[in-house]
Image (cartoon, grey):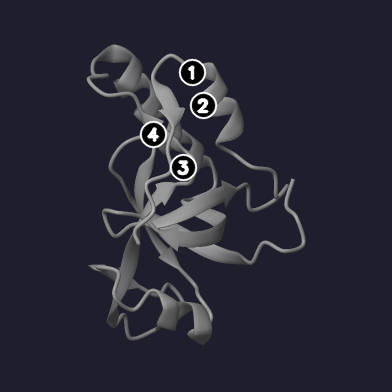
Amino acid sequence: MITEEENLFIGYVTKVHNATNFDIDIQLTDLKRDKYKYVYKSYYTAIDPDDEHVNPKRLYSYPCRVEGVSMRRNTFGRRTSESTYEIKQLFFLFNNWVLCSVGEVDYYNRILVKIYDPITKEPIMDYHYKKYKDIFEPYSRVSA
């Protein structure tokens, strides 16, 4: 469940790299956006369905990593593919919209995030990582 200290932001998942790494267009406050100004951004184009002139907009997403979890080294194959596929399906259920709490930037310049169901506000990754505990391990490589 979400604690009161966690700042939640609406995010749109633009790309799933694997079960722990995603590009998310996070709707940050100006203060938070300033904190992450040095994080690399991926650009994408979207069309607003309410725009009658159909003008494409250039938007950006941040590279994000699920906080506290990583795939074990040399873990490849069917289980890894299944895990990534299930994560993609999970995001698809929410039309790629999620709630995120954002944390520090890791060693690889990714924002560490916790991801929540946008309706129930329950963490959506916990069950998944327990199901695939044979391919995941703790992760905490934060940059200095």
The amino acid sitting under disc 1 is Lys
Mark 4 or mark 1, earlier in chain: 4
Q: Position of residue 75 (x, y in %)?
A: 27, 19
Q: CA distance from mark 4 to mark 3?
A: 22 Å
The amino acid on which the numbered mark 3 sits, given as a three-letter code, is Phe
**Residue 70: mark:** 4
Relative placement, left or right, of 80 versus 93 is left
User: Where does the N terminus fall, quadrant-wise?
Assistant: top right
Q: Secondary structure at mark 4?
A: strand
| Picture coordinates of residue 129, whole percent (x, y) | 51, 26
The residue at 50%/36% (across/down) is: 90
Residue assigned mark 3: 92
**Marks 3 and 2, Cα distance to the nearest angstrom?**
18 Å
Percent position of residue 78, x then y: 29, 13
For marks 3 and 1 on the same chain, the one whose residue lies earlier in the sequence: 3
Label 2 and label 1: CA atoms lie apart by 6 Å
| Gap in angstroms between the C-alphas marked 4 and 2 | 10 Å
Check disc 2 and give the amino acid type.
Tyr
The crowding category of the residue bearing disc 2, from other C-alpha atoms within 10 Å (few below 14, some 14 to 19, many at least 20), is some
Nearer the observer, 142 or 49: 142
Pointer 1: what residue? 133
Residue 35, picture quadrant: bottom left
Q: Are marks 2 and 1 in contact (CB under 8 Å)?
A: yes
Residue wearing tag 2: 129
Q: Residue at x 33, y 72 (%)?
A: 47
Q: Earlier in the sequence, mark 4 or mark 3?
A: 4
**First in sequence: mark 4 or mark 2?**
4
